[in-house]
Structure formats: structure tokens, C-alpha cells
Amino acid sequence: MSTTGPELDELDRAILDLEAEHWKYRGAKESAIRSTLGLSPVHYYQRLNALISSEAAARHAPMLISRLRRARSR
């Protein structure tokens, strides 16, 4: 994982893209995490939490990261 480096890897970008989607049905996001990314939800959220602190992630998806940082600080 390159969340501390200057650029994001493919999985990091896929995590951010998935997180930006809106989920209509309960459990749909967890199912997409498993099928699309091949990660357990726990591993997904661990990586996402690291990405929230990443400047590379903020450059890739500034509005999403800003929203997630505000939500985390509540």
C-alpha cells in the first residue's frame, strides 16, 4: 500500500472509487467490497482509514477525503 508515498496504487484508487458510490440496499457495499476488491470489510476499512490521512488520496479525491475527514473528527 502506498498511502504514505507520492501516488496511490490501483487498489487504493479502487477503494476511493467504491467509497464515493452511494449504496441503496443494506449489505450491498459489503458485497461489493468482497466481489470487486477481494477484501474483507475489515481490511477495506483499515485501508480506507489510512487513506483518509493520505495527501495522495486528498489529491486524487479531494471532496471525498474532505468529507471523510470531517466525519472521522466528529
Image: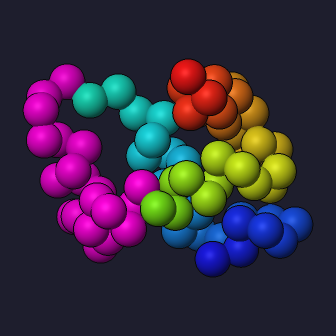
Q: Quadrant of residue 70?
A: top right
Q: Which residues are magenta?
A: 24-45
Image quadrant holding the C terminus, namely top right
Report the side of 17 relative to 51 (left or right): left
Point 52% across, 54% down: residue = 48
Can you give x and y, in whole percent of width and height, for residue 42 in the image? 32, 62
Res. 36 in view: no
Q: Can you name the residue that lies furthest to the left here?
A: 26
Can you give x and y, in whole percent of width and height, for residue 19 in the image? 45, 41
Q: Is residue 23 above or below residue 4?
A: above
Report the side of 44 relative to 72 (left or right): left
Report the side of 23 relative to 44 (left or right): left
Q: Nearer the viewer, residue 41 or 60?
A: 41
Can you give x and y, in whole percent of width and height, for residue 6 in the image? 87, 66
Q: Can you name the residue that lies furthest to the right here?
A: 6
Can you give x and y, in whole percent of width and height, for residue 40 in the image? 27, 68
Point 82% across, 51% down: residue = 55
Res. 16 in view: yes
Q: Nearer the viewer, residue 49 or 31?
A: 49
Q: Tell me how the rendering is colored.
A: rainbow
